[in-house]
Amino acid sequence: MDRVRMPQGRQFAVTWSIPDDYGGMTAAMLQRSSAFSRLGGTPVDVLTFDARSDTADLEKRLRERGVLHHGVRLVNLYDWLRRHPLPGGALRSERDVFTPLAEADATATRRRGDTVTSRVRSDEHGRTLQVDHYRDDGTLVLSDRRDTRRRGVVGGRSIVLCDPEGLPVRSWARIWPLYTAWLDALSARRPSFMIVDSKTIARFMVGYRRPHVITAHVVHASHRSGAGEAHPVRASRRDVLERLDGFDLVAVLTRRQAADIDHDVGRTPNLVVIPNSRPGSGASAGGMRGDHRNLGGSGGARDPDRGVVLANLTPRKRVSHAIDAVQRARGAGRSATRLRLDVYGDGESRAALERRIGRDTAVRLLGFDPDARRELATASFLLLTSRSEGSPLVLVEAMAAGCLPIAYDVRYGPSDLIRNGRNGYLVPAGDVDALAAAIVRLRELPVHRVEAMRREAMRSARRFDEARVTQIWARELHRAAVRRRLRRSPRLRRVRELTARTRVPASARAVVVNLATAFGAGRRSRGREKTGASRG
């Protein structure tokens, strides 16, 4: 097994939550964390901030399925507070009201088995007004009230932490200072690396700066606004993307997105390209192995008529296009009359898709299956119909399994991997007829041509081997740490002061400082393995 030399320091993966029906972003984060542990010998704590009460059970299930390496732990904010003190801070009782929730006032109670973990008070519209969290012995650990200005109306916040006796000891008027105190306690002033995957928690993390912590953000999906929008960056990502220098490292999955970010928000020196990895041989990702030899010839187990979709059933994924394309393809050629489509995933569009399918038994909605990726080893083709992507992990996994992708040519991902007609098919985004025609074209190819395409797809996926991608991460995290040290160095401060006194434009001064930083990072990085993708 290849070993990777990771930079010295603790490793954390930071995300908002891990839902039961998690998608590609979470799968990629868990895969990366397990690779760090397995290949680099570096334990990884995956930090979550949601209030789910069964994190320990979730970790056990993921471990049993082979998704988590034994060196990876799930650490939830509220579970941690139940078991650990949070030193420092002050109780501001004159400002932060403390009104523990009476059981009779609770509109919902969350339990882990028979143990109450939290109680919630909501208004008639379902908006949360207060959440009280409890320890296993029933004592109050944290009271989070969100209607302090006027009871029953959202506005004003008071977050009060309690000691093991349930007595208040520390308080905040906003939630982010609590997050800051927790991360400070976890890192304990030791060298640490925190990789942020969730765009939800990235808004907080972009402002979290500590001398001993290197922060990195992975942009998993497209940042671009839809057609007709005035601003090039979608509103949900604008706040973070306009402050990318708040992170020590920003990773995108494709060169094309890196170029677009440079164009949309300005040149970002800390921006790098690091693709998602596929599991290596012997590593599991929800029941799927890293190498597949079933090309699906006449004697193989692969079904030439079966296609699959692995996606959340949401409008952005446009699963209805995949269904329509298979139905049209069945009527377009004699060799395609037995085509079938299995859809794995769940979401808000399910009812509408069920109505669309009607009595067509050749299309099945099979719901969320945590091990759905194993179906890529026996399906003939994968349909990708999203409006936008970052670089879908399932695309790499399908190609590694010899399952041919037929994808809309959207930003970002498909065109970076697929060579039309050689290892899959690219069709114009939104063109259902072209999607159906590609399905028919694949089905009408001679078996030897299809087998050759499958072999080429598997070759294409090898550049996403987890050892290679983990090497890239190790290199870029090391460079980010060097850049941080250099920016605090007296020599670089002198460079900044000198350029500031000259009449050189600000943009040129920034180039000089960045060149000095890069030169220093290059000198300190010399001798390390030079693998990975440049921005080109």
Image (spheres, helix red, strand yellow):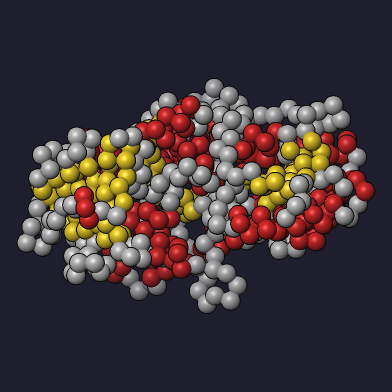
The residue lying furthest to the front in this view is 104
Location of residue 183 with respect to 357 vertically, above or below: above
Return the residue nearer the eye: 156 or 230.
156
Image quadrant holding the N terminus, namely top right
- Is 179 displayed left or right of 220 in the figure? left
Q: Residue 202's quadrant in the figure?
A: bottom left
Residue 267 appears in the figure: yes
The residue lying furthest to the top in this view is 1
Return the residue nearer the eye: 488 or 29.
29
Residue 414 in the image: state x and y as whole percent: 67, 52
- Is 201 displayed left or right of 259 in the figure? left
Location of residue 527 with respect to 210 vertically, above or below: above
- Is 470 displayed left or right of 147 in the figure? right
Residue pictured at 32% horizontal, 40% vertical: 111
Return the residue nearer the eye: 495 or 426.
426
Residue pictured at 50% horizontal, 74% vertical: 231
Residue 139 in the image: state x and y as whole percent: 16, 40
Residue pictured at 30% horizontal, 35% vertical: 114
Tally the numbered discs.
0
Residue pictured at 10% horizontal, 48% vertical: 168
Return the residue nearer the eye: 177 or 492.
177
The residue lying furthest to the right in this view is 334
Residue 498 appears in the figure: no
Location of residue 468 with respect to 236 vertically, above or below: above
Residue 18 in the image: state x and y as whole percent: 43, 43
The residue lying furthest to the left in this view is 94
